[in-house]
Image (cartoon, grey):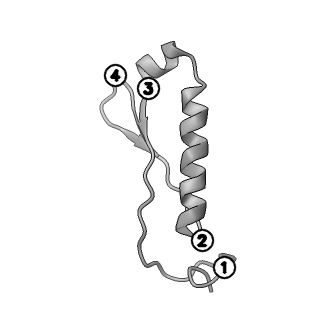
Amino acid sequence: MIMSSPGQPSVKYTASIYPTEYQCEQAKIGFAEAYAAKPQSYKDMMKVKAVCVPFDAFPIKGMPSPVGA
């Protein structure tokens, strides 16, 4: 998720890891729905974009295979 607000010197980002691309896409849909439900005054001040970026990673303890250990 990338967030931008007018008058700020940079953008803010938050990253989450999902074990499957499907789970990431579902989270992205939920985020978009939550943003859409915000008041217009919030949306006028905060622009957001959520993307799923697949990549190979080192094993992550507790994450199901093939991502996890």
Residue at 32% from the left image edge and 21% from the top image edge: 7
Q: How far apart are marks 1 and 3 (CA)?
A: 34 Å
Contact, mark 4 vs mark 3 (Cβ under 8 Å): no
- In the rendering, which numbered label is found on residue 46? 3
Q: Residue 19 carries which label?
A: 2
Drawn side of residue 69 relative to residue 53, left or right: right
Q: What residue type is labelled 1?
A: Pro
Write the residue at 61% across / 34% down. 34
First in sequence, mark 4 or 1: give its number: 4
Point out the tag, 3 or 2, that comes first from the N-terminus.
Answer: 2
- The kind of secondary structure element at disc 1 is loop
Give the Cα distance between marks 4 and 1. 39 Å
Residue drawn at x 47%, y 21% as measured from the top left: 43
Residue occupying the point 38% across, 26% down: 5
Disc 3, SS: loop
What residue is pinned by disc 4?
A: 6
Q: Distance between the residues labelled 4 and 3?
A: 7 Å
Label 4 residue SS:
loop
Measured along the vertical axis of the image, is residue 4 above or below residue 2?
A: above
Question: What is the quadrant of the C terminus in the image?
Answer: bottom right
Point out the frontmost of discs 3 and 2: 2
* Sequence-first tag of 1 and 3: 3
